[in-house]
Structures are given as C-alpha cells and as structure tokens.
Amino acid sequence: MNILREHIRSLFKLNEEEVSVFLAEFIRKDLQKEEVFIAEGEICHKIGLIEKGLMVCTYHKNGNEIIDEFAFENGFVTNYYSFLTGTPSEKTIRCIEDTTVYVISRQSLEKVSRHYAFIERMAGMMNERLFLRTHDRVKSMLLDTATERYQKLVAHRKDMVQRIPQYMLASYLHVKPETLSRIRKKLAKKIN
C-alpha cells in the first residue's frame, strides 16, 4: 500500500493527510485470475485502485472478445461510462493475473467528497487524464499504422509484451494475431 500511497500523493499533488483521508474509504480485495471485477450488464458503482496484478476490459460482439483497455498496478479501474450514467455496463472487466485491488463504492466516494473539497479537484484531474488518454488512443487508431501503434504501446508499457498474451495485444491494437507476429519479427530484425 505504501507504493500506492506515494503514487496517489504524487499524481494528485496531495499531502499525507489528504492521501490518508482518500484511501481510508478503500477496501482491499484479492481477486483470482479470470475473476470478474465488473460484469457486462451490471451497473458500475465502484472504482478500483490496483496494487498488484492486471485486468482487461472487454466488449463482446458476435462471439468475439474485443479488448478495450488494460489496467495495471497503480492505476484506477472502473467502467466510467456506466459509473457516470447509471446504465448497465456494456463491457466486462476481469483479472488476467491474480490481482490485489482497493475498492471504493460510489456511496463512500460521494460521502468523502461532501466533506473534503480536494476530492472534487482529484475528480477533475482524473477526468482530464481520461479524456487525454482516450483522445490519444482514438487519434492513434485513426492515424498510426499497426506497427506504430505497437511501438507506442511497448514504449509506454514495456512489460505488456511479457505479461499479456499475443492474441489480447492483437485485439487491443485491432490487428490479427498473425499480423502482430509479423510486426514483432520485423522489428526484431531491425534491432539485430
């Protein structure tokens, strides 16, 4: 939890008391690989903060799983659209590794934000970060080649290649697994 505390303090420019107030409402949950954090059809009333492990956010269409996003250590995880709108989740969020996540309910978050103004500032900062990340992902999908998308992914999270199965990376990049395999081989030849 110490690494999470430091990450939250640094990310939101909080003092130690503010970090303690914010994290006091979170409850630790240990989830197993393949365990579902938020199910498709469920209204999302919680936000998680991952201490250890990895989750994947997926849509399902015509029997296929489409990867939307991955959630890693020191990152928040939720279905933000469902959380904001109160509508059933159109995606599933599940663990692809054993995961330790600290969870806060909507009710607890609303309670603490009524008493502490810095929580609203944190929410604004999170919204900005989420918008920028979404913008960059959409722009990359529209303008970058599959190779460029893969290179950006590896540059941002080098450990993804080792931790995430190739078929999942391919889905996330919107390419076929064999295309990703060719990209990786081509890039490996350039390095050697």
Image (spheres, grey):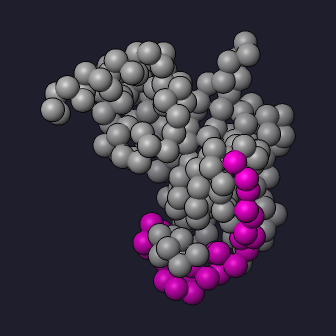
Which quadrant of the structure image shows residue 142? Answer: top left
Residue 21, visible in the rendered structure: yes
| 13 drawn magenta | yes
Which quadrant of the structure image shows residue 103? Answer: bottom right
Which quadrant of the structure image shows residue 192? Answer: top left
Residue most toward the bottom?
Answer: 17
Picture layout, residue 11 above or below residue 128: below
Picture layout, residue 51 above or below residue 70: below
Pick whichever, 38 or 88, lies toward us.
38
Q: Position of residue 137 (x, y in %)?
A: 43, 33
The number of numbered badges drawn on the structure is 0
Residue most toward the front?
Answer: 192
Q: Position of residue 79 (x, y in %)?
A: 69, 43
Give me the residue at 58% from left, 64% from top: 51
Give me the residue at 41% from left, 48% from top: 159
Q: Left or right of 23: which side holds 192?
A: left
Give me the residue at 54% from left, 66% from top: 121
Residue 110, visible in the rendered structure: no
Pick whichever, 51 or 24, lies toward us.
51
Q: Which residues are magenta?
A: 10-33
| 14 drawn magenta | yes
Q: Position of residue 178 (x, y in %)?
A: 44, 15
Give me the residue at 36% from left, 30% from top: 150
Q: Position of residue 45 (x, y in %)?
A: 79, 52
Picture layout, residue 118 above or below residue 85: below
Which of the image's four quarters has the N terminus?
bottom right
Picture layout, residue 151 above or below residue 124: above
